[in-house]
């Protein structure tokens, strides 16, 4: 193993470690050990420090006049070269590949953030933040009118990168994040001089430690600096540098006496180192931590000096000038042509590759090497670590991950694979994960990527941040491949990469547009869509928003057309000021909330004229917008109706406005004008009847306006012509009454009704309320004014004028129990139905039943029987009237059981005495040989026999045509009564199949329907019904009033439909049979031809 550890350098003294297993003496040749019962304490003489050359032929520009900085976690480097009036800044990868160059003015210092951004501090306090590709992302000013003398970079606990600045007037400023700068300042100390050393600590809270003279001060944000009482400080001389390690857990204080004091985060002294043996040539400003156990300084421009916490030292000499920078697990040494990484050997690597290492990983590694070489001893080695095989596999895996040499990686992975195959329980997840990480790291170390990342650094950086760095470098395919390979969550992986790629394309298009070269937006949008197609979760609206922000509205619109989320699409269209498209999409979305959102936005940002023009084209938006205007701006709503020529809503608006306008006895112009405008709108809508009604109402209002102030008119309903007319007649306004009668064309019935009310209104205690509908409420008025009826009836002259509408008087008298007066009114009734109803009001059901029977009102008789079913007297009387004691009422209408049928039979017997002989002699003809049916009297027995006749004839007014019609119908080729129907159907099926074969027709359905309809069209309604007319159809005819012709035609329609269905099925079956026959024939003929 000498070739594998030849570059390791010893720095640490003896360390004592405990191991829990005894080892064989053959691998302990170089170890000293002391046994104490079951525990062996091994005293290891050496611990090693290694260096790895990561890149060669890098071509770095290193000079004392240049500013040189490198990014943590194997990121890019930046070199600032001064010129006459500006600085040329060049950004390269670790392999020397140039990423970008740009110019900066008055550069004081440069740093890299952990998020891979270059920070350039101006002498005047301006801070500029660049991407690795040289694009300015952010800038801010720490304070106005300051001069920067020193700067420090520090890394916060949440991934932020902060900056601290010491000004010329000895003030310290700081920002906790250079990407979101909020400057703050340490309060001044009275009579304070320039600090001799200062730096920022971030172990707990951001603390600025500075030394003025021999006094140590600690300052924090918002807190005044306080003096630290430190017993270990050196009083003579001064402190020249303060350097914290990677996580600020240890701090190195360099004194002017070349003494380094190591303290921890609570300012306790850990150790003291002396640099007196190095000489005065050491560059004290280059003091840097190398891990947590070693410090590094530039001994000269071409040599590096390392010293451990136990004062062990080592010197590295190089051929060219060097620059050093701190990393998590070591330091990077940059020379002109190579990059070297110095780091302490990890414990896992030391356990496997250490000289005479007793660890199980080393024994497994040796067993694997022997197995590859084919030498003996493999079984003994494996048997030694059989109980610790899992630990040995773990050590080999981790050791392989820490290696930069792929050859060593393969050897250690083979050893781990050997041990894994010997485990009883195998969990391959860790093995697979580490192999994936190693493959990614080896890829990143390729010169064309140039990212020198160690395994320890990748563990802290995480894969999502690693893909972000590749995105910053423009390595889009590599970033996507690594995200997929390492199974990074899509939200933090592929989606972010694609979004940044799209933004990069947008920025390139923007730059091309600014220089006058118009990009092809359609091709660019298709390119973006093609990349996003496989990832539907990526929103095109976000990309479109960035395109709109870059003033590429055409590209934004093209991308929005591909957006699947309608809400985002509409939102972006509104931001692009494409309000017409946004409103149209919201209206078609069937989402009221989205439409409401768009309309609210329009109301807030657009004028009403613009909104009206937009919503007129969209009914859904128009309806919702009109709902808004009903409450907010009714007049504007009317203008919208007019603009759209919506006459129906205009009419409703005018009518509602006229109705809501209160009656003004002095001026009703608005009320009348509203009706007239409604009339005009209704005429345009061709609703002439309603328009005339509105016009008449307007005329009535104009007429009523002249009547205001006259006695009794204040209570008149001005919207009712009858009320006004009644008031005019009652108050002897003859001219007005005549005018109303002519203008509004009142009928004689209305005049008589008015006369009735007028007769009653002459009585003193008869009061009419004209607001309750006048004549329509006559019944209620009469009930209330019953005493007036009595007075009116007592005056024969007045009562003789009451010529109509006795029913309300009868109801009023019946309610108050005045039977005599009620009967006097009943005597004047001429309608039998009203007489029956009036008798029922008097609670005289028996008398009403007798009157209904006399007038042959069977329906009313049934109603009386059903209404007074519980009254035995009424029930008995009804049965007696019908002459059917014990027969239910439901049989009243059955032939032969009703009183009417009995009376008809008696009348028939009275007319036809000796009916049988007389009918036979009449029907036998002159010679007595002719046989004819008996006359079919409706309701008689012969009628039923007539309808049950076996002859099928057509019922017609001219009975002589029956036989000819029957013959013509029977001769139709498609009727179901035809004897040859089956043969005709087969013939038609054959004809149809031949027509299809010769491509004369493509579909046989419509030709068959047309052929059938043509053949039966002329005789369609001449087919008589075969149903019995005496059954349900006959009773329905009696109930509904249908005649026999109607029933015959209905039966004919049913018969023809039934025949059509049968014939269609027969033709279809024939077509299918002949089609099968033709197919078989074609198959046989084809086979014969093939022979």
Image (cartoon, rainbow, N blue to C red):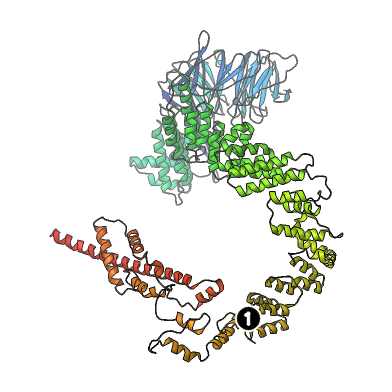
Q: Quadrant of the N terminus?
A: top left
From the viewer's perspective, tell me whether residue 1020 is left or right of residue 165: left
In the picture provided, is 589 more to the left or to the right than 370? right
Task: Between residue 1042 and residue 171, name the one nearer to us.
Answer: 1042
Which residue is farthest left? 1091
| Camera-nearest residue between 632 and 438 | 632
479 relative to 282, above or below = below
Q: Position of residue 306 (x, y in %)?
A: 53, 22
**Front-lying residue, 910 or 136:** 910
The answer to which quarter of the image holds residue 1064 is bottom left
Relative to residue 433, is residue 1038 drawn left or right? right
Mark 1 packing: few (<14 Cα in 10 Å), some, or many (20+)?
some
Q: Residue at x 46, y 69 (%)?
A: 1050
Residue at which label 1 appears: 889
**Image x and y of residue 105, in percent:** 55, 13
Image coordinates of residue 241 in percent, x first then y, are 62, 18
Viewer can see residue 757 = yes
Quarter containing the C terminus: bottom left
Answer left or right for 666 relative to 861: right
Image mark count: 1
| Callout 1 secondary element | helix
Q: Residue furthest right?
A: 764
Residue shown at the point (41%, 88%) measured from the top left: 924
Can residue 49 be seen here? no
Counting from the top left corner in percent of width and height, residue 483 is at: 46, 37
Q: Does 119 appear above or below 593? A: above
């Amino acid at each position: 193993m000498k070739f594998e550890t030849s570059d390791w350098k010893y720095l640490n003294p003896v360390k004592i470690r405990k191991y829990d297993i005894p080892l064989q003496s053959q691998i302990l040749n170089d170890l000293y050990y002391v046994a104490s019962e079951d525990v062996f304490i091994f005293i290891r003489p050496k611990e090693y420090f290694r260096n790895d050359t990561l890149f060669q032929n890098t071509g770095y520009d290193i000079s004392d006049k240049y500013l040189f900085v490198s990014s943590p976690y194997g990121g890019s480097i930046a070199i600032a070269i001064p010129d006459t009036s500006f600085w040329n800044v060049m950004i390269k990868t670790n392999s020397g590949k140039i990423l970008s160059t740009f110019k900066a003015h008055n550069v004081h210092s440069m740093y890299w953030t952990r998020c891979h951004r270059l920070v350039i501090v101006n002498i005047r306090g301006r801070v500029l933040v660049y991407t690795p590709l040289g694009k300015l992302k952010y800038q801010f000013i720490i304070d106005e009118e300051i001069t920067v003398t020193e700067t420090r970079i520090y890394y916060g606990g949440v991934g932020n990168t902060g900056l601290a600045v010491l000004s010329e007037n000895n003030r310290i400023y700081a920002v906790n994040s250079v990407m979101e700068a909020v400057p703050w300042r340490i309060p001044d100390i009275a009579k304070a001089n320039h600090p001799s050393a200062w730096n920022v600590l971030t172990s707990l809270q951001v603390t600025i430690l500075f030394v003025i003279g021999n006094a140590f001060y600690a300052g924090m944000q918002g807190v005044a600096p306080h003096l630290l009482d430190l017993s270990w400080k050196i009083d003579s001389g001064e402190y020249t540098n303060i350097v914290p390690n990677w996580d600020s857990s240890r701090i190195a204080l360099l004194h002017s006496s070349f003494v380094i004091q190591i303290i921890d985060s609570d300012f306790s002294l850990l150790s003291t180192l002396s640099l007196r043996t190095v000489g005065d040539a050491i560059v004290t400003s280059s003091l840097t931590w190398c891990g947590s156990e070693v410090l590094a300084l530039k001994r000269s421009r071409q040599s590096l000096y390392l010293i451990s916490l136990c004062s062990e030292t080592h010197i590295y000499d190089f051929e060219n000038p060097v620059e050093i920078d701190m990393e998590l697990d070591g330091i990077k040494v940059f020379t002109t042509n190579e990059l070297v990484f110095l780091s302490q050997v990890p414990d896992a690597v030391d356990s496997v590759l250490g000289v005479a290492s007793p660890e199980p990983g080393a024994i497994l590694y040796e067993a694997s090497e022997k197995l590859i070489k084919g030498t003996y001893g493999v079984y003994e080695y494996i048997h030694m670590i059989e109980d610790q095989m899992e630990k040995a596999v773990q050590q080999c895996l981790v050791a392989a991950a820490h290696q930069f040499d792929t050859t060593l990686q393969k050897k250690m992975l083979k050893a781990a694979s050997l041990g894994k195959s010997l485990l009883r329980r195998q969990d391959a997840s860790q093995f697979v994960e580490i192999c994936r990480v190693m493959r990614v790291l080896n890829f990143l170390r390729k010169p064309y990527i140039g990212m020198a990342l160690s395994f320890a650094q990748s563990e802290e950086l995480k894969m999502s941040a690693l893909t972000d760095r590749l995105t910053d470098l423009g390595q889009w395919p590599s970033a996507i491949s690594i995200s997929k390979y390492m199974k990074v969550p899509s939200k933090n992986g592929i989606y972010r990469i694609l979004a940044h790629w799209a933004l990069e394309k947008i920025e390139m298009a923007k730059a091309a547009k600014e220089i006058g070269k118009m990009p092809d937006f359609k091709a660019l949008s298709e390119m973006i869509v093609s990349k996003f197609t496989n990832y539907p979760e990526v929103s095109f609206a976000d990309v479109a928003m960035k395109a709109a922000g870059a003033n590429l509205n055409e590209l934004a619109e093209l991308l929005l057309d591909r957006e699947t989320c309608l809400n985002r699409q509409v939102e972006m269209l509104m931001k692009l000021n494409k309000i017409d498209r946004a409103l149209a999409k919201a209206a078609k979305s069937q989402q009221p909330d989205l439409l409401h959102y768009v309309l609210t936005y329009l109301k807030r940002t657009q004028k009403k004229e613009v909104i009206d023009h937009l919503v007129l084209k969209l009914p859904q938006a128009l309806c919702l917008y009109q709902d808004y205007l009903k409450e907010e701006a009714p007049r504007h709503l009317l203008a919208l109706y007019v603009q759209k020529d919506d006459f129906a809503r205009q009419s409703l608006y005018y009518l509602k406005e006229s109705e809501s306008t209160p009656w003004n006895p002095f001026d009703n112009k608005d009320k009348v004008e509203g009706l007239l405008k409604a009339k005009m709108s209704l005429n345009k809508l061709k609703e002439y009847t309603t328009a005339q009604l509105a016009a008449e109402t307007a005329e009535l209002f104009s007429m009523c306006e002249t009547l205001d102030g006259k006695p009794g008119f204040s209570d008149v309903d001005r919207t009712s012509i009858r009320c006004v007319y009644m008031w005019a007649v009652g108050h002897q306004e003859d001219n007005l009454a005549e005018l109303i009668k002519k203008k509004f064309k009142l009928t004689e019935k209305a005049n008589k009704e008015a006369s009735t009310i007028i007769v009653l209104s002459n009585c003193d205690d008869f009061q009419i309320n004209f607001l309750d509908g006048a004549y329509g409420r006559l019944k209620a008025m009469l009930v209330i004014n019953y005493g007036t009826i009595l007075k009116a009836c007592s005056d024969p002259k007045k009562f003789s004028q009451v010529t109509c509408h006795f029913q309300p008087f009868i109801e009023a008298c019946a309610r108050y129990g005045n039977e005599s007066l009620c009967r006097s009114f009943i005597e004047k009734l001429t309608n039998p139905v009203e007489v029956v109803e009036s008798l029922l009001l008097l609670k005289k059901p028996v008398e009403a039943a007798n009157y209904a029977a006399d007038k042959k009102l069977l329906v009313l008789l049934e109603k009386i029987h059903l209404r007074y079913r519980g009254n035995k007297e009424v029930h008995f009387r009804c049965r007696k009237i019908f002459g059917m004691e014990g027969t239910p009422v439901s049989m009243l209408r059955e032939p032969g059981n009703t009183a009417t049928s009995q009376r008809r039979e008696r009348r028939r017997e009275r007319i036809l005495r000796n009916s049988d002989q007389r009918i036979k002699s009449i029907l036998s003809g002159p010679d007595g040989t002719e046989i004819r049916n008996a006359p079919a009297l409706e309701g008689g027995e012969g009628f039923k026999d007539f309808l049950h006749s076996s002859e099928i004839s057509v019922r017609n007014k001219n009975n002589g045509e029956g036989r000819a019609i029957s013959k013509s119908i029977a001769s139709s080729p498609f009727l179901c009564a035809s004897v040859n129907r089956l043969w005709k159907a087969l013939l038609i099926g054959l004809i149809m199949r031949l027509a299809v074969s010769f491509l004369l027709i493509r579909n046989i359905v419509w030709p068959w329907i047309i052929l059938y309809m043509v053949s039966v069209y002329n005789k369609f309604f001449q087919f008589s019904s075969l149903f019995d007319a005496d059954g349900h159809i006959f009773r329905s005819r009696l109930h509904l009033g249908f005649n026999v012709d109607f029933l015959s035609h209905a039966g004919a329609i049913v018969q023809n439909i039934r025949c059509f269905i049968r014939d269609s099925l027969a033709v279809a079956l024939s077509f299918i049979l002949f089609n099968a026959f033709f197919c078989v024939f074609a198959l046989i003929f084809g086979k014969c031809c093939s022979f």
